Image (cartoon, rainbow, N blue to C red):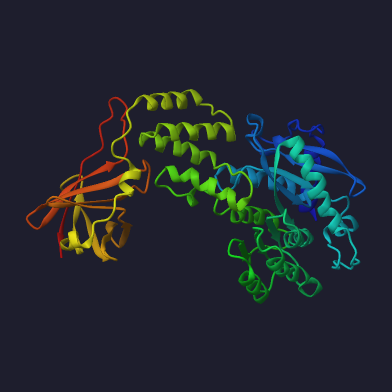
């Protein structure tokens, strides 16, 4: 097929142009720079287990040359076809904060038929007319017991394996997930699960009993082949609660086209809880702690996305939290190397250290206990009104307050345009003399609290909104934030 021939030619050019001496970066290949394939190389690995010398493709993450830390390893089977795709997809997903930076390793087949089927068929299963005594077990030994220790020694791999396989590769990858605790992150693309009377799903079911305490993340993306619905239902029902399992049918893909989109969707799904939007945004000190907690389930160190760390440093800065901001900057440097604007970051942190701490903090506001209903019964109900910056441009708002197990709770409702309602849970409520203060976290940055401080004027609750828990420093000549007014009447 012309498409496959072109892809194989691309891999051949990439591999042959690379420096074969680990762990030096690859020589430049013929792509528009910068390109993720610039950091690829090929090694010749003499395997005692296989009794062969195998070519292995290595793709280093963007930050590799600027750090001394260790990285997870993404191993892609059928490396002659999938390695360039995996390098590009993994690098871009990491840059977007959807998965951690990884070393990408491609294991090419020695030949298209006998070698591939032999390596990717576990003993006890017949694939494409093979015997039931093929070399899948040895192939996994090669990956786990020879290749990975070498990668840890020469390329600073941290021991974490992400294994991806397509078709027959999905068979051996799923078999690894079913039988070996070292393989905790597995992506299977178009797995022919029906072979051997559901032989692979039966082994996966067995893992729910034999290795229930070992965490597993398993994603199956399917076009032509895959699990049947009833078997997958039984598997997910039997799986421990700490396992993360996902399956999706991609109706508009073919068996041949699936690897590209499958790598993108599959890796993003495997690391769904890693992405920037999954981390808690407030209080800011919880954001990076979220990734430290993640290490317990992963079993390996977790470095948060670089873009998120930068945001956290800025947010901690406006919250006046000098030490946490400095700790976050050290994490950024250790994880990704010193940024090109490091002088600006250091000055920001130095200036922050000289400022007095804020007397009102976001954490303190969030920790304020809600008023007891006995002290706030007059506020229970729905309040309607408006807020505005300019008197002639008012916007409808509502405040809904209720009794929640003896304390005051509620929501702020706004209508930015006709037919659009935005409901925001109140995270701060305080009864004050002749009024009520209430607020919620800003949905954008800066991550301060939008505090509404209201006083009664007759039966109307009116006041101003301000940012709470942050220190907003405006550049010289820039005006301060506009004054937002509000008024509400109970209906």
Of 176 and 272, the residue lying toward us: 176
Report whether 88 appears left or right of 377.
right
Q: Position of residue 474 (x, y in %)?
A: 30, 30
Residue drawn where x is 73% and y is 49% of the image: 75
Q: Is residue 185 above or below residue 235?
A: above
What residue is shown at x 70% (from left), y 35% (from top)?
39
Residue drawn at x 50%, y 48% is 290
Residue 93 image offset from top left, x and y in percent = 59, 46
| Quarter of the N terminus within the rendering | bottom right
Toward the right, the furthest residue is 51
Q: Residue 248: which quarter of the image?
A: bottom right
Q: Nearer the viewer, residue 22 or 437?
A: 437
Quick check: 461 above or below 133? above
Q: Left of 223 or right of it: where is 329?
A: left
Q: Is 72 left, or right, of 119 in this rendering?
A: left
Residue 69, by quadrant, is top right
Q: Quadrant of residue 306?
A: top right
Left or right? Give the position of 277 relative to 185: left
Is any atom of residue 344 visible in this view? yes
Q: Position of residue 424 (x, y in %)?
A: 32, 56
Can residue 80 be seen at all in this image of the molecule? no
Q: Quadrant of the C terminus?
A: bottom left
The number of numbered badges drawn on the structure is 0
Q: Residue 64: horizontal and vertical position, in percent?
A: 66, 34
């Amino acid at each position: 097929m012309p498409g496959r021939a072109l892809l194989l030619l691309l891999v051949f050019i990439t591999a042959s142009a690379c420096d074969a001496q680990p762990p030096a970066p690859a020589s430049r290949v013929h792509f528009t720079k910068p390109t993720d394939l610039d950091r690829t190389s090929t090694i010749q690995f003499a395997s005692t287990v296989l009794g062969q010398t195998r070519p292995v493709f290595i793709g280093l993450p963007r930050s590799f040359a600027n750090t001394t830390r260790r990285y997870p390893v993404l191993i892609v089977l059928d490396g002659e076809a999938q390695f360039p795709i995996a390098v590009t997809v993994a690098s871009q997903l990491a840059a977007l904060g959807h998965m951690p930076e990884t070393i990408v390793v491609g294991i090419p087949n020695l030949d298209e038929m006998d070698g591939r089927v032999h390596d990717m068929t576990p003993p006890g299963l017949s694939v494409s007319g093979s015997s039931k005594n093929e070399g899948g077990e040895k192939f996994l030994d090669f990956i786990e017991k020879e290749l990975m220790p070498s990668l840890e020694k020469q390329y600073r791999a941290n021991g974490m394996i992400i294994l991806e396989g397509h078709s027959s590769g999905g068979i051996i990858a799923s078999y690894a997930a079913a039988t070996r605790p070292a393989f905790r992150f597995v992506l299977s693309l178009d797995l022919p699960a029906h072979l051997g009377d559901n032989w692979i799903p039966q082994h996966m079911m067995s893992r729910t009993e034999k290795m229930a305490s070992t965490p597993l993340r398993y994603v199956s993306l399917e076009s032509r082949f895959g699990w049947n619905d009833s078997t997958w239902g039984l598997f997910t029902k039997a799986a421990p609660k700490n396992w993360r399992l996902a399956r999706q049918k991609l109706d508009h893909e073919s068996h041949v086209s699936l690897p590209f989109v499958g790598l993108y969707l599959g890796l993003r799904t495997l690391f769904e809880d890693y992405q920037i939007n999954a981390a808690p945004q407030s209080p800011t000190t919880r954001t990076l702690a979220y990734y430290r907690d993640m290490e317990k389930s992963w079993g390996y160190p977790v470095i948060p996305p670089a873009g998120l760390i930068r945001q956290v440093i800025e947010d901690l800065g406006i919250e006046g939290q000098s030490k946490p901001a400095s700790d976050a900057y050290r994490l950024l440097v250790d994880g990704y190397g010193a940024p090109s604007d490091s002088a600006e970051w250091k000055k920001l942190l130095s200036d922050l250290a000289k400022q007095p701490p804020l007397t009102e903090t976001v954490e303190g506001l969030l920790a304020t206990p809600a008023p007891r209903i006995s002290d706030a019964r007059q506020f229970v109900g729905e309040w309607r009104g408006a807020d505005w910056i300019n008197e002639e441009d008012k916007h409808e708002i509502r405040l809904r307050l209720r009794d929640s197990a003896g304390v005051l709770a509620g929501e702020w409702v706004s209508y930015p345009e006709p037919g659009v309602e935005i409901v925001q849970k109140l995270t701060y409520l305080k009864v004050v003399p002749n009024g009520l203060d209430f607020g919620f976290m800003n949905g954008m940055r800066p991550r301060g609290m939008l505090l509404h401080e209201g006083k009664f004027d007759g039966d109307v609750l009116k006041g101003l909104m301000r940012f709470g828990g942050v220190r907003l420093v405006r550049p010289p000549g820039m005006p301060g934030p506009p004054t937002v007014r509000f008024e509400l009447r109970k209906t």
